[in-house]
């Protein structure tokens, strides 16, 4: 993946009202290749709602989100982005390998093989392990391994450090920095401090 300034995710004049309460209004942002957009705020401030709007899962009450200058429905956005939510999103009845093969079947192949991705997230040797035998942290690392085997410019991550210990957080931060260094971009929420060396991090604080 090569850095390309033409890749840009932009939000213009976004607003969202929930239960007669304005979560945000007149919100603008732009994030390009190599950058991270970090959404911060207390519980209930609208972080996940904004993330769902960015994903295209929910329409804003006003404004629009565009990808490379085109509104999301008219762009190739969904083939360029990958979403990992607060839940792991893995099939508990399948093995580690079967989960990754399923993800690969639904997406364009990335630069890493399944074996290489498992090595990266420190799950090498767990190919045939059933999901219910994994720890919460291992399940989280597996959910993020799906990003490494598929080709996605934009990663959208809702609390990616959930269930990870300190070592796991450092590992995932290194993978995120590597993704940005290769020309990718990330939009994410996190209750943890984010330490991505050399990465341009933009912040939106919702309250």
Image (spheres, grey):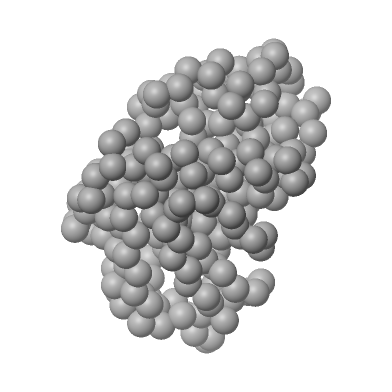
101 left or right of 128? left
Check the picture and name the quadrant holding the C terminus: bottom right
Quadrant of the rendering where the N terminus is positioned? top left
63 in relation to 125, above or below: below
Between 13 and 161, the residue placed more toward the observer is 161
| Number of residue marks | 0
40 and 77: which one is in front? 40
Relative to 41, is 1 on the left or the right?
A: left
At 46% from the left and 80% from the top, the residue drawn is 24
Residue 47 location in percent, x, y?
54, 67
Q: Which residue sits at x=37%, y=38%?
A: 182
**Where does residue 25 sit, x and y in percent of width and height?**
41, 83
Answer left or right for 42 relative to 33.
right
Q: Is residue 158 left or right of residue 3?
A: right
Q: Nearer the viewer, residue 14 or 117?
A: 117
Task: Give percent across and percent down for residue 57.
Answer: 43, 56
Q: Is residue 201 visible?
A: yes
Q: Residue furthest front?
A: 198
Q: Is residue 52 visible?
A: no
Residue 104 horizontal/vertical position (percent): 45, 23
Residue drawn at x 60%, y 41% as measured from the top left:
172
Q: Is residue 150 above or below residue 88?
A: above
């Amino acid at each position: 993946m090569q850095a390309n300034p033409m890749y840009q995710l932009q939000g213009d004049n976004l607003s969202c009202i929930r239960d007669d309460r304005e979560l945000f209004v007149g919100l603008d942002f732009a994030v390009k290749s190599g950058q991270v957009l970090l959404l911060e705020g207390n519980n209930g401030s609208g972080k996940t709602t904004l993330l769902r709007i960015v994903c295209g899962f929910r329409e804003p009450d006003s404004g629009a989100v565009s990808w490379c200058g085109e509104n999301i429905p008219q762009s190739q956005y969904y083939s360029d982005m990958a979403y990992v939510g607060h839940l792991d999103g893995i099939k508990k009845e399948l093995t580690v390998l079967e989960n990754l093969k399923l993800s690969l079947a639904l997406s364009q192949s990335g630069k890493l093989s399944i074996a290489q991705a498992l090595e990266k997230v420190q799950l090498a040797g767990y190919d045939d392990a059933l999901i219910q035998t994994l720890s919460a942290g291992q399940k989280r690392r597996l959910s993020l391994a799906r990003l490494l085997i598929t080709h996605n410019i934009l990663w959208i991550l809702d609390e990616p450090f959930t269930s990870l210990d300190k070592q796991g957080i450092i590992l995932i931060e290194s993978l995120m920095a590597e993704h940005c260094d290769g020309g990718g971009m990330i939009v994410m929420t996190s209750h943890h401090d984010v330490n991505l060396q050399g990465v341009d991090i933009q912040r939106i604080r919702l309250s």
